[in-house]
Image (cartoon, grey):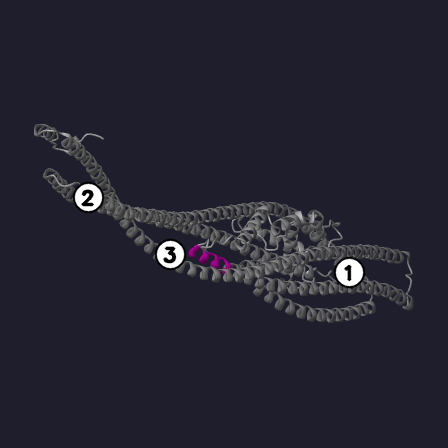
Amino acid sequence: MAQPGPAPQPDEDLKRQNAVLQAAQDDLGQLRTQLWEAQAEVENIKAIATVSENTKQEAIDEVKRQWREEVASLQAVMKETVRDYEHQFHLRLEQERGQWAQYRESAEREIADLRRRLSEGQEEENLENEMKKAQEDAEKLRSVVMPMEKEIAALKDKLTEAEDKVKELEASKVKELNHYLEAEKSCRTDLEMYVAVLNTQKSVLQEDAEKLRKELHEVCHLLEQERQQHNQLKHTWQKANDQFLESQRLLMRDMQRMEIVLTSEQLRQVEELKKRDQEEDEQQRFHKRKDHNRTEVEEEAKAAAVCAFTHEESPAQLSNEEEHLDSTHGSVHSLDADLLLPSGDPFSKSDTDVFKDGLRRAQSTDSLGTSGSLQSKALGYNYKAKSAGNLDESDFGPLVGADSVSENFDTASLGSLQMPSGFMLTKDQERAIKAMTPEQEETASLLSSVTQGVESAYVSPSGYRLVSETEWNLLQKEISALVLRAQASEILLEELQQGFSQAKRDVQEQMAVLMQSREQVSEELARLQKDNDSLQGKHSLHVALQQAEDFILPDTVEALRELVLKYRESIVHVRTAAEHTEEKLKAEILFLKEQIQAEQCLKENLEETLQLEIENCKEELASISSLKAELERIKVEKGQLEATLGEKSQQLEGLQEMKTTLEEQLKREAAAKATVEQLMFEEKNKAQRLQTELDVSEQVQRDFVKLSQTLQVQLERIRQAGSLERIRAILNDTKLTDINQLPET
């Protein structure tokens, strides 16, 4: 009797799951690199902020120092000018004192001369002439003093105008310094807000890392539960295997008994049928081995390419897993030599695919929401409970591999455990990561307001630039860093497109593998149907042979009884064998149906996963396009800033020229002011001297008038006097030693 061949193992599922796990590890590496880049960028921005803060503080200190130096220089200049003015004033005062002393001496000499003349008794005509001369001198003095007073008033006006100009220049400088300090304060507040935004982003990333760590611990717990369930199923499989071997032994014993009962002709026919079945089985095995070797070579080439592309970080770990799985597969081979299993490498790959796909399903609970059902569909179809007599060794091959993978996985420490790169986030988490946070929106609004403020800022006539050279260099560095980031984003976009095309090809290959497995299942069903038909044909053949051969009934009752008993025993053995074969076929059919259902569920899950990955790729493409638009905007802003920089540099050159001209003009005005002040002091002293001379001349004139009046009165009294004694008495009464002794008339 021909035995049914072993059921095909789901190598394709294991390979597909292995590919999914490899993609997950690749995604983990990308996420890790992105995390490192984000941390490096945060550190870089912090360094830039500190450097900008230091440079800004240094610039403020430099401006304050320059302002203090200018103020000190102005104070020193003012002190020097005041000292010079005081020195010149003292010199002029001494000169004027000397001149006044000389003038006083000359006046005293003139008075003495006049007294001498009076004492000599000059005539009235001389007095009148002197009075006329005094009046003429007074008129001359008035004609000289009036234009001098006008000139002094004009000089005073010019001096006040020069002082107003100096004050205006000082006020403009102070105003510009205040404006610059206010701009520095605003830049500092912007930088502080930017650093605060970066700190919030860092805290969000740390919270995401904590969430990922918690989910990883949950996955480890689920893995431990799966390992315990697998150990239980392994014990069940061992019991079923023992029962299967016992049933095989009983079946072989029944076959030996039937061979003893058969005749030589029947034995010869049975041998011929066995040889024919063996030849057919050998041919089928030979074809299967060829197909298997060809597929194995192709899969090895694909696996080598994928490993070279995606597993540069952990080759040693994968080799250890493959060795462990190969040893497990060798133990499976030792259980039954008649069962045909594929080589260890595809078995291990498919097995690790099943295990790692289950791991990924456990991790993506937030994104899919049905991790339990998906886990039971992806892993649980091999864990179906079967009766002890209907289990086959081929049903438990993947379980042994999964157990080995779980044991190998449990030996690793949690410290060295690496989160798979294909860890699937929820849609909300992805949207929260990719969307702009309120801090980022605030930062963007601040940056836009700053750029608009720069474009529409009021440019004073002086045209000073609002940023220093160091800050301008920092802005250039930031622009170059943004350009580099945009280029890196373009490279990442190309890599994502290549990865998307590779994933598409992998999906197509997996679909082809699924179709091939489905064809193999249909071929297995056809083979089972053929075996059933052949068994029915053999039964009819045996009936025909029994009818054709010459059957001689026994002569005695004892011989007839023995023959009947023998036939009854053979009938019982045949019935038990037929029932056993029927149950085995039913179990195999049920297993194949469950396997088809599991493959269908796995296909649906794979389609959902691929759809999610396609959506993620689309979102990444959208983000990259936004980055490109941002890069273009930055380039445009850079061009505008360069143009404004050229204009500002031209304005700065013009301002420097204007500054030099104003400094020269200020020097000229200061020199003119000094000369004007000197002239003013000289004219003032001259005016004071002339005023005093005028007062003295007026007083002399009044004294002359008094003297002439007194002389006229005395002359009149002398004319009216009748005797010499009277005249002498009058003359004795009029002896004067000072002009102030004259009586008022």
Horizontal side, residue 70 vs residue 608: left or right: left
Q: Which mark is residue 662?
A: 3
Q: Which residues are magenta?
A: 468-480
Amino acid type indicated by mark 1: Met
Residue placed most toward the observer, 437 or 236: 437
Q: Are marks 2 and 1 in contact (CB under 8 Å)?
A: no
Q: Nearer the viewer, residue 516 or 90?
A: 90
| Residue annotated with mark 1 | 255
Q: Is residue 578 above or below residue 712?
A: below
Residue 457 coordinates in the image, percent (x, y): 52, 53
Amino acid carrying mark 2 in the image: Glu
Q: CA distance from mark 3 to mark 2?
A: 58 Å
Q: In this rendering, is residue 270 above or below 84?
A: below
Secondary structure found at label 3: helix
Image quadrant where residue 127 sits: top left
Q: Quadrant of residue 304?
A: bottom right
Position of residue 487 relative to residue 36, above or below, is below
* Badge nearest the viewer, 3 or 2: 2
Query: For residue 130, which numbered disc appears in the image?
Result: 2
Mark 1 vs mark 3, CA separation in Å: 125 Å
Image position of 117 (left or right of 311)? left
Q: Is residue 76 in sight in this rendering? A: no
